Amino acid sequence: MIDTLLVGNRGEVAVRIVRACRLLGIRSVVAHSMADRDTLPVRLADDRVCLGPAQAGHSYLSIPALLYACVRVDADAVHPGYGFLAENSDFAAACRDSGITWIGPSPEHIALLGDKIATRNEMVRAGIPVPPGSRTHVTDLHDATRQARDIGYPIALKSASGGGGRGVLRVGDAGHLAECYGRARDSARALFQDSRLYVEKWVDNARHVEVQVLGDRHGDVITLGERDCSVQRRNQKLIEESPAPGLTPAVREALGDWAGRAARHLGLRNLATVEFLVDDRGEVFFTEINPRLQVEHPVTESVTGQDLVAWMIREATGEPVPCTQDEVRSRGHALEARITAEDPENDWVPGCGTVTGYVVPGGPGIRVDTWLTHGTVVSPHYDPLLAKVVSWGPDRDTARRRLIQALDEFTCDGVAHNAKALTAILRHDEFSSGEHRAGVVERACPRRAPNDEVDL
């Protein structure tokens, strides 16, 4: 059993984990930086411990600081949330070696899935469809050019240690590849301390669809349906929904089958997300597996009734998956909009400031996951996510209209945010019809000069 759980994260996900601990009767301690010492998750937790200064490298990304925090508060478990060290196999292994329960997939699985080339090869062995591409990393520009020519342009030039939409570049022809190869290699080294690159066939006009997978130490695996995450800007998700619209029953079934097969092939435990691309013809291609909680997990919770964060904690203590695959039920439709401290009217420049006025939307089927309160200081040091507004309805259009209404009610004075742009996307014909693909953000919210007038 877990007595004290250290929350190794901040913001709305820290609030989410604290609330799960309360339901389970577990003492929660939020590990925070100096910049976050007065935030909502710190106030809601049973205790707090300071990691260090605002800079993430000296606080949320410091393994020694987090391990020392566990000792100080006598924590016997750590939930890393998402981002920061959630997919750091060294941190997971250090916790395990120190006798601290790690809430999430094993260090070995995190390490494997952090290597996109190795993961891709495992999926080939498991019989999961992958796009044409590399079996090993490219050795130099000449090798990349040869492989790209064999695959056929356009291609995706990817970092072997990428993830979360980072380290992916679309390359349209050989000239473009020559132009950006060195930049992509240097960027991969800077972002991931790994300069290895590989190439894959680029899938144009694809839907980004992912499947939630749960596995336990007994070898049982279930899937909890799929989420569509195609509404992205610069490979960062803005709106997600479940179930994914526009899929045939055959494609929907295949996605679940392949995700379950991938998890069983790897022997995955706890919670993970298997991600796919679905092209215009309904052809499916595997992209990656994320061995952690996803930002968009509330849409799956809304349609299945499962508490994924509480289940992650319970599984870490040895509990089995919460039901059989035949018992999984999906009811209605859910949508999630990510409200971020970014200004769409100023080329999405990140913002910061103090919240001087705050109104939480409500109404039937509305859930808001946030760390904001009146007086919250939004710092430039961290991810700009302010809140997730989630709507549920008996059908997609009801959920969409409820989300629009909730976003119209959302008020966060003092900090620039993207709520109006999200509303514009939800109202756009391409999205409302369920036929949206990559690029819908740019079509719904076109870039404009600073003096242009536009009603978002």
Image (cartoon, grey):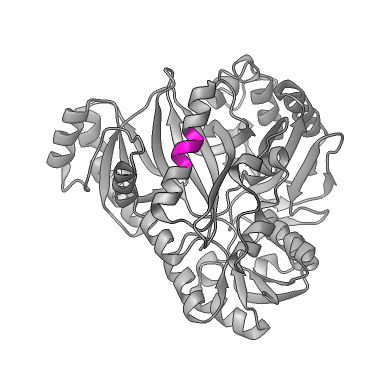
Residue span colored magenta: 255-259
For residue 233, above or below residue 439:
below
Q: Is residue 301 visible?
A: yes
Q: Please state if 291 lies on the left or on the right of 9 as rendered.
A: left
Quadrant where the image shows the C terminus = top right
Which residue is pictured at 86% across the width and 34% down the height? 364
**Observer-nearest of 209 and 67:** 209
**Where, by quadrant of the figure, is residue 155 drawn?**
top left
Residue 438 visible in the snapshot: no
Residue 167: give x, y in percent of width and height: 38, 45
> What residue is rendered at 69% in x and 58% in y?
310
Residue nearest the viewer, comparing 334 with 345: 334
Image quarter of the N terminus: bottom right
Q: Which SS does the magenta portion mostly show?
A: helix
Q: Is residue 258 magenta?
A: yes
Q: Residue at x 36, y 38 (%)?
A: 128
Residue 30, placed above or below residue 392: below
The residue under the point 80% across, 38% down is 366
Per the image, is 221 magenta?
no
Is 315 above or below relative to 240?
below
Where is residue 177? Give x, y as percent. 23, 34
Residue 145 pos. (x, y %): 16, 35
In this rendering, position of residue 403 left or right of residue 179: right
Residue 328 on image: x %, y % = 65, 41
Q: 354 or 147: which is nearer to us?
A: 147
Q: Is residue 286 left or right of residue 43?
A: left
